[in-house]
Amino acid sequence: GKEGYPADSKGCKVTCFFTGVGYCDKECKLKKASSGYCAWPACYCYGLPDSASVWDSATNKCGKK
């Protein structure tokens, strides 16, 4: 698998700015990752499936129309 910042449907990182402990681990596991943590202010996942969308500065479309 791969690791990285999981991207939501808009291509944005999953924020953990105001979330509780364990939020990112749960979010990452929902995306079939093995684990995750809050790399403040965004979630970072380990063991993502290769098909998972991760945030990439080169292909960043967050906030763009």
Image (cartoon, rainbow, N blue to C red):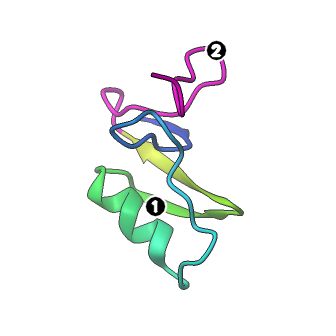
Front residue of 57 and 34: 57
Element under disc 2: loop
On the image, the x and y values in percent for residue 10 come to 39, 36
Q: Which residue is mark 2?
A: 58
Identify the residue shown where x is 53% and y is 40%.
3
Q: In the orientation shown, which residue stands out farthest toward the top? A: 58
The tag earlier along the polypeptide, 2 or 1, is 1
Report crowding for label 1: few under 14, some 14 to 19, many 20 or more residues within 10 A (C-alpha): many
Residue 48 picture location, percent across and down: 40, 42
Q: Residue furthest bottom?
A: 20
Q: Is residue 31 magenta?
A: no
Region rendered in magenta: 49-65
Residue 33 sits above or below residue 7 on the image: below
Q: Which residue is painted at 30% across and 27% down in the image? A: 51
Estimate the x, y position of residue 17 in percent, counting from the top left.
64, 69
Using a 10 Å C-alpha cutoff, classify the residue at mark 2 as few (fewer than 14 neighbours), some (14 to 19) or many (20 or more): few
- Residue 56 drawn in magenta: yes
The residue type indicated by label 2 comes to Ala
Image check: 2 left or right of 34?
A: right
Q: Is residue 16 above or below residue 64?
A: below
Q: Secondary structure at mark 1?
A: strand
Question: Disc 1 marks which amino acid?
Answer: Ser
Looking at the picture, how far across and down is residue 36, in whole percent?
51, 61
Horizontal arrangement in the rendering, residue 41 relative to residue 44 (left or right):
right
In the rendered structure, find residue 35 and report the number of the disc placed on it: 1
Q: Which mark is residue 57?
A: none
Residue 42: image quadrant is bottom right
Query: In this picture, is 50 found above or below 4?
Result: above
